[in-house]
Image (cartoon, grey):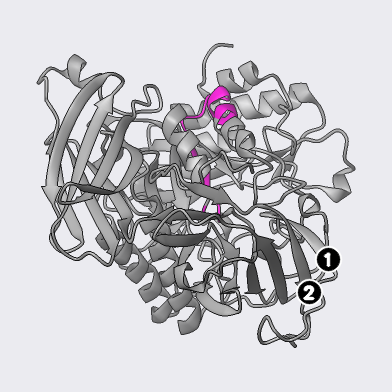
């Protein structure tokens, strides 16, 4: 990615420097190097931010490598009192040195971290940045999502991602600056909640000016005093009181209205920091068995999206690829995606905000249960919610999927406790969005009941779900051999969403024994017919408040995408769109 694609789209400054590009690189399979001064053999070069397993990195090495090292020499013209070094994501445990000084440590492969490197900078010489990333490929007790623990990708798991896989960048700020910004839409009050957290040396006498605008129209321009380093205010918008006029300001996939924001931090009359951001006015809620968007029932038409690319794995090849994925989902008739087992790059969420696409955010799973695994998951999930809380596109949080990492929910109280704890923790961290405790089956604490059912026969699906008598379904239906709800957690009337179904494999170019899906077809005509019939059933089933089709694009051995791995459509986009919306024919 170029330096012109700002990595943190909801807290933007002008002064920043991308460190993406060619770095020195070394494998440390024997874990022999404890620090950067131990004679590391820098025998490789790598293109950051692409993982060494990817072809885009220049290495394409998918062998087991539990530890890797990076080195970059760079010049920096000092233009601020404080210099911050940011990492979008490093998988899994990172240590960072600048000019021989340890400046950061972080654990968690999908979330960002920052180091204040001001005191480690040197003058008159290049800065030397070294990163150590430890990522045990056999460790099933860490959140790893779809990354395979076997040498060759198998079943529904894909190549591993080791080390740096999102943008590395630097920005220069004042000694006191805006560290964190959090937006909360308050639909009923026609207000925007604004929380500002500053960091730095100045602890008193700070104020922040918040200016909200829509095009040329100024919606608010207010100044708030910080209490210490924090300000927390509700900004009232002018409420026209008429639904049609209200709708002109509401964000939805059909009308993704974003409110531009500019914040200026001051100490007295002195400007310390200026950042640009955006927010939106929208609400997500539940009303009995319906999902509600902006106070109205809203049918969810989602597609499951793994977020992988053949040449670059979990890292998008460029910013345009992220935008194109959002555009393609909309072009196929979907109003949202379920990002599966991946905390996606914030640039994807930016395009979903800007172009109008709902996002279900799901925590990558660990695959073994232990107190250590749960502790790791809680830490990383907390960081993910903090990072993405302000994005209007994010409408649902999903901490667990298909009992992965908690495989004995029916028998082990500790496993049930983990699901309930993560559900309630998520509701504490964000009271504005629904939470699915465990998606697919074996539901305990949950706001939406997600069901995974890959029956490829449309009429059987219709017969199974068309009845409004849900108790029979919950007593007898066992998708994947699992009960839908755990004992003590009967269905309480929550919305029901078919969150995985379909998975039709179609790839005329690949031998069938090298690829798979949940069902298979051999011609484009048959593929369209099967998809259209399945979507007709789920669109017309009153029990469902929405659906999520598997899947967006072919992903390695899985050829059950609506698109090929290179994002070309298997059948014309207009035909997919028509079938997705159950329109025509």
Q: How many numbered markers are drawn?
A: 2
Q: Secondary structure at mark 2?
A: strand
Residue extending farthest to the top is: 584
Residue 255: x percent and y percent? 36, 22
Where does label 2 land, which residue?
A: 27
Q: Give the vertical position of 482 relative to 504 (above or below).
A: below
Q: Which residues are magenta?
A: 327-343
Residue at 13% across, 58% down: 205
52 vs 269, left or right, is right
Q: Quadrant of the N terminus?
A: top right
Residue 203: x percent and y percent? 19, 66
Where does label 1 land, which residue?
A: 44
Q: Residues within 10 Å of mark 1 (few under 14, many from 20)?
A: few
Residue 3: x percent and y percent? 59, 43
Camera-near label (2 vs 1) is: 1
445 vs 341, left or right, is left
275 vs 568, left or right, is left
Q: Secondary structure at mark 1?
A: strand
Compare residues 47 and 357 and report the one nearer the observer.
47
**Residue 425 visible here:** yes
**Residue 487 visible here:** no
Q: Quadrant of residue 34?
A: bottom right
543 vs 520, left or right, is left
Residue at 46% across, 47% down: 8
Image marks 2 and 1: residues in contact by CB distance under 8 Å: yes
Q: Quadrant of residue 438?
A: bottom left
Q: Quadrant of the C terminus?
A: top right
Q: Is residue 355 magenta?
A: no
Q: Residues within 10 Å of mark 2 (few under 14, many from 20)?
A: many
Kindly report the distance in space between the C-alpha atoms of the residues bearing marks 2 and 1: 9 Å
Residue at 78% across, 72% down: 26
Residue at 83% across, 59% down: 59
């Amino acid at each position: 990615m170029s330096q012109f694609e700002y990595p943190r789209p909801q807290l933007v400054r002008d002064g920043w420097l991308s460190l993406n590009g060619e770095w020195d690189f070394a494998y440390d399979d024997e874990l022999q190097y404890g620090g950067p001064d131990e004679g590391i053999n820098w025998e490789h070069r790598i293109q950051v931010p692409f993982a060494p397993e990817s072809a885009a990195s220049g290495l394409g090495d998918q062998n087991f490598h539990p530890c890797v090292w990076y080195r970059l020499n760079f010049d920096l013209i000092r233009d601020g009192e404080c210099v911050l070094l940011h990492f979008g994501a490093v998988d899994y445990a990172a240590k960072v040195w600048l000019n021989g000084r340890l400046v950061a440590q972080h654990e968690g492969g999908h979330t960002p971290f920052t180091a204040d490197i001001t005191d480690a900078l040197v003058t008159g010489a290049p800065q030397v940045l070294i990163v150590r990333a430890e990522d045990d490929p056999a460790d099933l007790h860490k959140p790893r999502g779809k990354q395979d623990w076997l040498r060759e990708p198998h079943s529904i798991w894909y190549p591993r991602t080791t080390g740096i896989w999102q943008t590395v960048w630097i920005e220069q700020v004042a000694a006191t600056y805006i560290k964190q910004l959090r937006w909360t839409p308050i639909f009923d009050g026609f207000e925007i909640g604004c929380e500002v957290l500053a960091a730095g040396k100045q602890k008193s006498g700070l104020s922040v000016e918040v200016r909200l605008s829509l095009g040329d129209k100024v919606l608010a321009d207010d100044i708030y005093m910080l209490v210490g380093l924090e300000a927390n205010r509700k900004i009232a918008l002018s409420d026209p009181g008429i639904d049609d006029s209200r709708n002109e300001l509401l964000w939805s996939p059909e009308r993704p209205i974003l409110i531009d924001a500019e914040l200026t931090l001051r100490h007295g009359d002195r400007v310390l920091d200026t950042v640009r951001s955006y927010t939106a006015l929208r609400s997500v809620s539940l009303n009995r068995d319906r999902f509600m968007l902006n106070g109205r029932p809203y049918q969810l038409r989602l597609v499951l999206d793994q977020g992988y690319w053949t040449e670059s794995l979990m890292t998008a090849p460029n910013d345009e690829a992220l935008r194109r994925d959002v555009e393609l989902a909309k072009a196929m008739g979907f109003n949202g995606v379920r990002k599966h087992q991946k905390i996606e790059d914030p640039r994807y969420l930016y395009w979903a905000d800007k172009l109008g696409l709902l996002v279900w955010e799901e925590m990558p799973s660990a695959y073994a249960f232990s107190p250590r695994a749960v502790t790791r998951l809680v830490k990383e999930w907390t960081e993910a919610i903090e990072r993405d809380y302000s994005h209007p596109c994010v409408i649902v949080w999903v901490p667990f999927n298909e009992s992965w990492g908690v495989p004995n929910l029916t028998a082990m109280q500790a496993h049930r406790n983990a699901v309930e704890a993560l559900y309630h923790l998520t509701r504490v961290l964000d009271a504005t969005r629904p939470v699915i405790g465990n998606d697919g089956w074996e539901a305990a604490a949950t706001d939406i009941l997600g069901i995974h059912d890959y029956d490829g026969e449309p009429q059987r699906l219709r017969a199974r779900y068309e009845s409004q008598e849900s108790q029979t379904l919950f007593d007898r239906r066992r998708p994947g051999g699992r009960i839908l709800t755990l004992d003590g957690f009967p269905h309480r009337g929550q919305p029901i969403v078919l969150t995985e179904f379909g998975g039709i494999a179609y790839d005329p170019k690949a031998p069938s024994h090298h690829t798979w899906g949940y069902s298979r077809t051999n011609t484009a005509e048959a593929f369209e017919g099967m998809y259209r019939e399945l979507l007709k059933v789920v669109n017309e089933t009153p029990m469902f408040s929405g659906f999520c089709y598997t899947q967006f694009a072919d992903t390695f051995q899985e050829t059950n995408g609506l698109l090929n791995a290179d994002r070309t459509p298997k059948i014309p986009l207009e035909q997919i769109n028509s079938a997705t919306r159950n329109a025509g024919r």
